[in-house]
Structure formats: structure tokens, C-alpha cells
Image: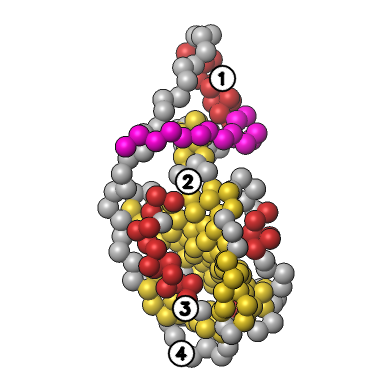
Amino acid sequence: MTMSRSRTWPFGLLALALACANAERSQSGDDDPLPPPTPRVEAPPGPTAALTLRAVSFAEGAMQLELVDAPHDTHAWDQGGVLSQTVALGDADVLRILVRAGEGESLASLRREHPRAAEADLKPGRVCDGVARRLELREPEEIIECIEYADGRPSAPGYTPPMTIVAQEFRSGPLDVVATWELPTALRERYRDEEARFFASFRCGAAPALAVE
């Protein structure tokens, strides 16, 4: 199936692409303009990983939750901390889970970090016996025609597919928490059940003896 794709060019990426184009032109000795990029063809999703979730303790956030049965990282802040996990789904596609628990964490802050994303309506809910809010952001694809690496690697094109970020805001004791589940939009339905289980798994308070990494 062929899908039309919009090209969005932040100024920095546009400058980088033009620099690569100029370099290629000067190397060839030809002053003719480069041909336009070939339209991308949306290929059907390839084989994707089956995800198994398990309960873990996030002591810095004073909570328990379920993550993919794979390594994850935590880092303590002066108040609270952050938990992160990146899981390969197949080919170059990954799932990114991030839980930030601290002072002033909010969906508004997350929204400012993704100025190009389209936003779905806020949905209310309850987590840890308190009010929660959930937001979906849809990032457009990002195309970089040429990346010049400072370490000497050959220049190469770069591409990020359309991404969906589902975020949930709630409180764990005195901590403001934002948990995000981010993956390629084309794989959203494939992992819809795991997404729902992740967001339903949060338990706040003293942590029992669970897996910690």
C-alpha cells in the first residue's frame, strides 16, 4: 500500500540537508541541481516481538508497575527519580517507556517537548486512588536526507516514522508523575493490549519485594 507522506523540515534539519546536498554537488563537479527525493513507500510491518510484562518496583517513585520482561534503568533525583526502558520491536522499530516522578512533572511540560505533535483530547481516569489524566500525541514522520557524522562515519539518510506517545499524569504520594508509552503509530494496534495493561498496572505506596534492576 502506498501512502502519501508530508515532509516537515525544522530549520536545523533543512540546513543539514542543504549542506549535504552542496557537498555532493561540489564533489561531483556538476552544478546541476540534485533531483528531488524519491517518494517513500509504506511497507507493511515486518515481524514484531511478542511482549511479556512483569511486575517491578520503582522505589524512587514509591510505586510498583508492570514493564516488558527486559532490562530497564532507574535514576534517583533529589526528590523522586526516572525509570526508562527501550524495547526492540522488530527491524529498527522500538518501544520507549518513560516514568518521571518528581516535582512539577506534568502533561503540559511533556506537550512543550513535542511542539509538532497533533494532540488528542484529554481523558480522565483514576490511578493510585487519585485523579489521573491521559493524553495522546501523534508525531509526524521526520525525514533527513543526509546526516554528516563528526566521527568519520559515511553520511547517510535518516528517518523517524510517525510516532504515537500515550502519556498519563497522576500523583504518587507527594510526587507528580508522568508515564509515557511511545512507539511507531503503525504498530499501535499490535500492542494495544500491552499498552492498556501497562497503564492499569500502577500501584503507589510501600513497595513489596519485586524485581529490581
Between tags 4 and 3, which lies in front?
3
Quadrant location, the N terminus: top left
Q: From the image, tell me which residue sits under label 2.
A: 162
| Magenta range | 1-15
Q: Position of residue 30 (x, y in %)?
A: 50, 9
- Mark 4 or mark 3: name the one nearer the start of the chain: 3
Location of residue 207 in the rendering, given as x and y in whole percent from the top left corner: 52, 88
- Taking depth in this image into account, of 164 and 122 the one nearest to the observer is 122
Asked if marks 1 and 3 touch (Cβ < 8 Å), the reply is no
Q: Label 1 amino acid? A: Asn
Q: Does 92 appear above or below 35?
A: below
Residue 143 at x, y percent in the picture: 50, 36
Amino acid type at mark 2: Pro
Marks 1 & 4, CB-CB < 8 Å contact = no
Count of marks overlaid on the render: 4
Determine the image quadrant of residue 56: bottom left
12 in magenta: yes
> Is residue 201 inside the magenta stretch?
no
Q: Amino acid at mark 4?
A: Ala
In what element is the residue under mark 4? loop
